[in-house]
Every structure is written in structure tokens, then in C-alpha cells.
Image (cartoon, helix red, strand yellow):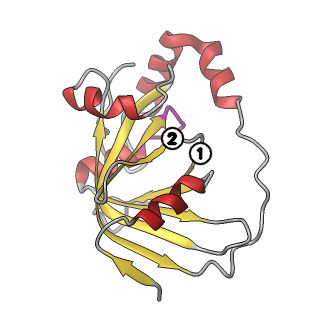
Amino acid sequence: MGKFNNSITLAHKEFINKQHLFFVATAPLSNSGRVNLSPKGLDCFRVLSEQKVAYADLISSGNETSAHTLENGRITFMFCSFDKVPNILRLYGKGFTVLRGSEEWELYAPNFTIYPSTRQIIVADINLVQTSCGFGIPLFEYKSERDTHFIWAEKIGADGLNEYIQDNNLKSLDGLPTNIGQL
């Protein structure tokens, strides 16, 4: 079942900071809507307080997190260790998108490395933290981050990135609008 907390403890934060990978899950309100689960890496996640987290979100093939949090706010993050000490940590809360040029951007962006392909920052107010064993999680050895995204982004440039957003990031798979702007 796991252990529950109403806020992020120092031990939780230390565990999160050691992970090279996390997952973010969101879903629309519609019964027929698709649940989205996305892996994230590249040292983009930050614990901002006992109740607030954020991550810098790079342009990718879809923008489900933005659409779902715009519609209903529900968001879950999952971290799991792949080293000797098995552990799973989930953060449950309400999320929202922060766009370039907004007052909120000026507040949150200094916490991250902002790349030309950073499309938004996802912020979440956390209301429940769950930890559980990770006995079924396999052991993996971290090798390195991939540079494929950055090579692609540099190759197509700012205009190409904005065109990609217009072509691929304005609606969810289920047709919900996203909260997205220009880079």
C-alpha cells in the first residue's frame, strides 16, 4: 500500500534529486479520453517547496500535459529508483502551464536551464505524496543523457521549432486545446 504524506519531506526531495528519469501522468475528464504517461529526463525537475514542484518541458511530439492540466489540473509524477535501494515515489496534485513572456515565467524560469526548445514550464501544487517499495523494479545502470533532441532543435532552428509547435502541439490526441505560445 505504501506510506502517505501531505507534503514533500527532505528525504523525498533527496530521493527525487538522485533520479535521472521521472514520469508524468495526466488524463482528460472524458471517459473515452486517453490517459497520458510521459517519461522525462535531462535534469529538468525541481522541488520548489514542500507543496510545489515544476519541470521545464521541451518540445516533443505531443502536448497532452498542457491540454489535460488546462482542462482539469490533475497530474501525477512518479519517480522510481533503478539502483540498489528499491523505492517508488508518487506526487499527486494540480498542475498548470507557464508560458514564456508571462509574469509566472519570470518567477519559475530561473530554476532551470532554459533551452531554445523549452516550450513551457509545468508547475504543480502537490497535495499527496506516496512512497512504496520498488522490489519489482529492475536494476539499471545510468549511462548518460541523449543529445538527440538538442541536435534536432538546433538543426530546424527557432522558426522550425515554432512551426513544429503549430503543427503538433496545439491540441491533445482527443482534441482538447493546449495552453501554448510561441518560443
Q: Where does the C terminus fall, quadrant-wise? A: top left
- Residue at figure coordinates x 45%, y 68% from the top left: 90
Q: Residue at x 28, y 73 (%)?
A: 6
Q: Considering the numbered disc 1 on the image, is that residue within a helix, a strand or a loop?
A: loop
Q: Is residue 59 a member of the stretch shown in magenta?
A: yes
* Amino acid on which disc 1 is placed: Gly
Whole-percent x, y for residue 24 in the image = 47, 56
CA gap between label 2 and label 1 equals 6 Å
Q: Of 151 and 130, which appears nearest the observer?
A: 130
Q: Residue at x 25, y 47 (%)?
A: 70
The amino acid on which the numbered mark 2 sits, given as a three-letter code, is: Cys
| Residues at circles 2 and 1 in contact by the CB criterion of under 8 Å | yes
Look at the magenta stretch and give its main secondary structure: loop
Residue 147 vs residue 131, the one in the foreground = 131
Q: Is residue 103 left or right of residue 164?
A: left
Horizontal and vertical percent position of residue 9: 38, 66
Locate residue 19, reporting x and y percent: 60, 55
Q: What is the magenta range?
A: 58-63
Q: Residues within 10 Å of mark 2 (few under 14, many from 20)?
A: some
User: Where is residue 122 shown, x and y percent of the image?
Assistant: 36, 43
**Is 85 above or below relative to 100?**
below
Using a 10 Å C-alpha cutoff, classify the residue at mark 1 as few (fewer than 14 neighbours), some (14 to 19) or many (20 or more).
some
In reply to whether residue 169 is colored magenta, the answer given is no
Q: Which residue is mark 1?
A: 41
Q: Relative to residue 141, is residue 177 depicted above or below?
A: above
Relative to 11, does residue 40 appear above or below in the rendering?
above
Residue at the disc numbered 2: 44
